[in-house]
Image (spheres, coloured by chain):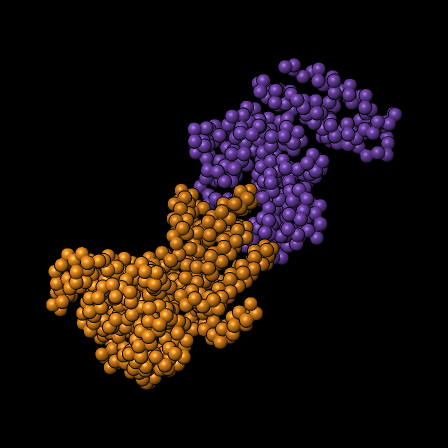
Chain colours: A orange, B purple
Amino acid sequence: MNEQQQSLWGFMSQQADKLGVQTLQHIGLTFISLFIAVLIGLPLGIYITRKKSLSGLVLGIAGILQTIPSIALLGFMIPLLGIGAKPAIVALLLYALLPIIRNTYTGITGVDATVKEAAVAMGMSKWQVLFKVELPLAMPVILAGIRTATVINVGVATLASYIAAGGLGEFIFGGISLNNTNMILAGAIPAALLAIIFDFLLSLVQKLNFKKIKGAVKIAPVALLILSCLYFIPSAYGSKLTAGFTPEFMGRQDGNLGLQSKYGLKIHTIVISDAVMYKAAQEKELDVISGYSTDGRLKAYDLIVLDDDKKIFPPYYAAPVVREDALRKFPELEKTLNLLSGFITDSIMTELNYKTDYLHQSPERVAKDFLVAKKLYRADKGGKAGVVRIGSKIFGEQYILASMYTMLIKGYTNYDVATKTGLGGTKIVFDALTNDQIDFYPEYTGTGLLAILQAPPKTVTQLQVSKDSTYNYVAREFEKRYQLKWLKPIGFNNAYALMMREKQAKELHIKTISNLKRYLDSK
Amino acid sequence: MIKVEQLVKAFGATKAVDGISFEVAEGETLALLGTSGCGKTTTLKMLNRLIEPDSGSIAINGKNILEENPETLRRGIGYVLQNNGLFPHYTVAENIAIVPQLLKWDKAKTDKRINELLEKLHLSKEYLNAYPSELSGGQQQRIGLARALIADPPVLLMDEPFGALDNVTRSKIHSEFKVLDELKRKTIILVTHDVQEAFELAGRIALMDKGKIVQIGTPAELLFNPANDFVSDFLQEQRLQLEFKAIKITDLWEHLPKGSRKTNTSSLSAESDFWTVLEQFRFIKGENLNILNQQNKEVKTITFEALMAAYSQYKNLQPHE
């Protein structure tokens, strides 16, 4: 326990810079959106006290906005406003609207009717009644609304990191994808503290008596503005290009940490979710992104992969992993599966993924078209000499490979095939294989090395030099530990990669990550 | 001073005020008396246009108020509310200074006037920086009155001004109210459901029911010459006390024995009502009171028995219902 605390403290002091930036961004996001929400919500709340017939409608709409799940709301914002601070602020302000409008409405309608009548009867104009009587008397209730909105915003602002708006969510979600508890806590604890502190400070303001509130209300907009500006401090320093990395990539040695230590790459980086990253790159909001080298979106969005000339990304060559007893049971299997070896390069795999992901062709059709084109396709022999069980993970590339293997086995051998595709993540499909539920599935060398064998860092560093050394290592270890055999690699490497828009990369003459660094360092 | 003609106000299907007309002379106090829902408050609020009439006319000093700017109009009319309507977020001083602030008085003038009023209303200056919630109900009501009087408006509208006070405080404020010189010059319209209050404070009473004035006249006229059963029934319960308050010693003057004795005690005015004089008796054996009739400068020295005898003679001469 003590060790845990120390290492959390260690992590926080080690990442103090980042933590500071994220905290400032978090406060900034919270208060920019709060400020705008007050600017909109307060007049709107006042307006519906004058036009009561609209109050149900306005409060209803604000209420519905409140019920939209935050992730979904952020998602809706992307097509409208792109990524970054703008959509995050809009989403946050939409959440802050309901408590502000409702409390303004409740506060003002709750002002003693006798007092309002007295104000009118004294000869005050309607604006004087509003500013001298209704607003000051409603202020404690309005402040309570602003307080609620602040706490909501501090919470929702953690999600802003999904769309590259920064904030403490970068640590929280990075930590979740890396299974790094310290990282999660380094984001979650400051976020919770911010909520508690702001709630406490606003409760103090709320408790002030009328006299002091007059002063506090004048200071409030200034304070809000100052807090809002915190967001812009970190982004004041930038670089020529902007990178967008997933939270997972940010925290990995074979990710951003490696880019910094091995390449010395210094680039203005924002954290963004995988789902919107490619699109943002295409729309020139990001220049460099992290991704997978055979992702179909590479082709869809005209991106190219930068050559990893210092080899920080471990190779993820795909190859079928087969049970040894299955190889004995189906003597022709190995030969058949190896037919595919060497045919599929990175760009071909990207193309095939593009066809399923973007042209929405079925994996079977894509597999058949490919085999026919390569003259590998043979008609189904309708064999009855046993059933080979094929597994696959739950994404497009694996479905295509499984289909190809099915066709090859049926065309070249007398075996029949049963497919068990869509077996979730690595752990599920690997367990299915070791427990004799399937005979083989396509696996990647990097996954085998890091996720299944969980090789020590030292070994990993040694192996990263070439694709063969990794392949040889996993093949040897799988055989030894699990009696599983890695067949010949299919050819493509689905590894982490840095990507840029093809056009921009050509203009800037950037082909490798070292080129990118040189460009960034040049004045 | 104030002339109201054929005033009508309907809320939905119900006519809250149904064709009311009356006049109030300068310096006079008129009470609008009636049960809740009779339209008395609606009538009052139309006078400073808190409620806009559907039809009819209201003139103050010959000017049609419906053509005036409502805010300017209201700044020239004092208004006292039942629950005082003080601003809870303003100090006493700020509350009183609301209208001067709207009229853009300078601070010295406002302060001078506030001090003057505080003195007249028997309020200590130490309250000036207090908030209304720190004061008692009676004090709050006095502040409410000060706020209405600060700009010395010729017209004062009072909506159940003492309704929220307990009996002891109310009668104390009643007696202060009657002697306050600030109020003697003002034309006052007072809304109340309290018969006693109307009889005590008003020169004339308009008894209202269902949006109409049933009878308008002096307290004595309503008591002794009721227009119909509604009026007499309305007053029935407190009749004796009302009569004591409605009858002035001048009304009994001819029935009181002549002759005066020189005593050192000061004399009461014959303008006092019967009730006030009764209150002066301490019921000591052989007690006398001197009463001065201003009209003919005559002084009469009377005993309790003589006073009661005069009362019963006076009553016998009144028409019976």
Which residue is outermost to the right? Answer: B285
Residue A449 at x, y = what percent?
35, 72
> Is residue B142 visible in the rendered structure shown here?
no
Task: Return the residue nearer the eye: A182 or A439.
Answer: A439
Relative to A450, say whether A427 is above or below. Answer: above
Task: Return the residue nearer the eye: B215 or B125.
Answer: B125
Relative to A173, say whether A308 is above or below. Answer: below
Q: Quadrant of residue A228?
A: bottom left
Task: Return the residue nearer the eye: B115 or A222.
Answer: A222
Residue B258 at x, y = what percent?
80, 22
Relative to B109, say whether B271 is above or below. Answer: above
Which of the image's four quarters has the N terminus of chain A? bottom right
Which of the image's four quarters has the C terminus of chain A? bottom left
Relative to B230, say whether A25 is above or below. Answer: below
Residue A479 at x, y = what percent?
33, 71
Q: Quadrant of residue A289?
A: bottom left
Residue at 40% x, 50% y: name it.
A67
> Is residue A427 visible in the rendered structure shown here?
yes
Residue at 64% x, 51% y: name it.
B131
Residue at 28% x, 71% y: name it.
A486
Residue at 27% x, 64% y: name it.
A326
Q: How many marks?
A: 0
Task: Return the residue nearer the eye: A151 or A372.
Answer: A372
Residue A221 at x, y = what percent?
49, 62
Say left or right for A384 vs B158.
left
